[in-house]
Amino acid sequence: MGMSLVFGIGILTFCIGALGVLLRKNAIVMFLCIELMLNGANILFVGVSKFKGLVEGQAIVLFVMAVAAAEAAIGMAIITAFYRRRGGVEVDKADLMRW
């Protein structure tokens, strides 16, 4: 695999996630798109690390994966609480996070 292919996949994955965050109104879909953006960045980190022969990119990816796991747990808890309170997960229903 060439460097341009890895960069293309990483940038495409990141851009699809960014478009999903901007265009969708469902909190769960937005949450998944943020995860997609993190994965796109991870692909770029690993790609640069492989082609430069460095280990730092892979270490950063491990850190990002740990942060993403914590974010997933907290984010899903917030979305679940929001669903129970509001009866839906549409972000239009969030009026200044007033309960």
Image: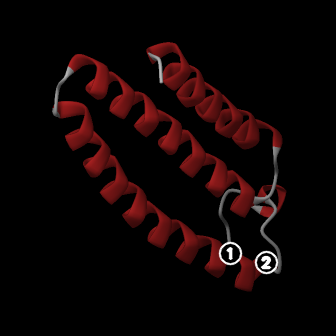
Q: Give the percent coordinates (x, y) of residue 42.
A: 41, 38
Residue 51 falls in image quadrant: top left
Q: Is residue 44 above or below residue 3?
A: below
Q: Which of 82 and 7 is in front in this view?
A: 7
Image side of residue 41 versus residue 88, left or right: left
Q: Give the percent coordinates (x, y) of residue 87.
A: 82, 81
Which numbered tag is attached to residue 17? none
Image side of residue 73 versus residue 85, left or right: left
Q: Which of 91 and 49 is in front in this view?
A: 49
Density class for disc 1 (Cα within 10 Å; few <14, some 14-19, many ≥20) is: many
Q: Give the percent coordinates (x, y) of residue 94.
A: 74, 61
Q: Mark 1 points at which residue?
A: 82
Q: Is residue 74 above or below residue 41?
A: below
Q: Residue at x 59, y 33 (%)?
A: 14
Residue positioned most to the front: 1
The residue type indicated by label 1 comes to: Phe
The answer to whether the residues at label 2 and label 1 have Cβ atoms under 8 Å apart is yes
Q: Is residue 3 above or below residue 74?
A: above
Image side of residue 31 versus residue 39, left or right: right
Q: Residue at x 34, y 48 (%)?
A: 64
Circle 1 sits in a helix, a strand or a loop, which is it? helix
Q: In which quarter of the image is the C terminus?
A: bottom right
Q: Is residue 37 above or below residue 76?
A: above
Q: Mark 2 points at which residue?
A: 86
The residue type indicated by label 2 comes to: Arg
Q: Which of 34 and 4 is in front in this view?
A: 4
Circle 2 sits in a helix, a strand or a loop, which is it? helix
Inter-mark Cα distance, 2 to 1:
6 Å
Residue 28 falls in image quadrant: bottom right
Q: Residue at x 44, y 16 (%)?
A: 3
